[in-house]
Image (cartoon, grey):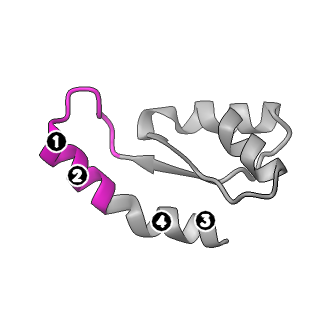
Amino acid sequence: MHDTVWFEIQGTPAVSIASSEFVDAARTQAEALGMQDAKRVFVAHPIQDADDQQMSSKADAIVDEVIAALRA
């Protein structure tokens, strides 16, 4: 979230991508950084033990959402 907020303050569209396990943590951190509307997209959890094919599938599932967030 820190990077997303920093880029947004600089005027560069940004979106945080994290595991769905961190929805609450991301919201809390965005609020603490003073940008509760910081854009964020969540990929299906877990990701730690995903192989390359599984990660590609997870990324494919959110790519449209990431693009939409960057355009917003």
Instruction: Give the label on residue 56, or none.
Output: 2
For disc 1, the neighbor class at 10 Å (few under 14, some 14 to 19, many from 20) is few
> Depth check: 44 or 7 in front?
7
Which quarter of the image is occupied by the N terminus?
top right
Instruction: Give the label on residue 39, or none.
Output: none
- What span is in magenta? 44-60
- Which of marks 4 and 2 precedes in the sequence? 2
Q: Which residue is mark 3?
A: 70
Q: Find numbered disc 2 in the image and state the secondary structure of the residue it sits on.
A: helix
Residue pushed farthest top? 48
Q: Find numbered disc 3 in the image and state the secondary structure of the residue it sits on.
A: helix
**In the picture provided, is 20 more to the left or to the right than 71?**
left
Distance from the alpha carbon under mark 1 to that under mark 3: 25 Å
Residue under the image location 24 percent in, 45 percent down = 55
- Labels 3 & 4 near each other (Cβ < 8 A): no
- Labels 2 & 1 near each other (Cβ < 8 A): yes
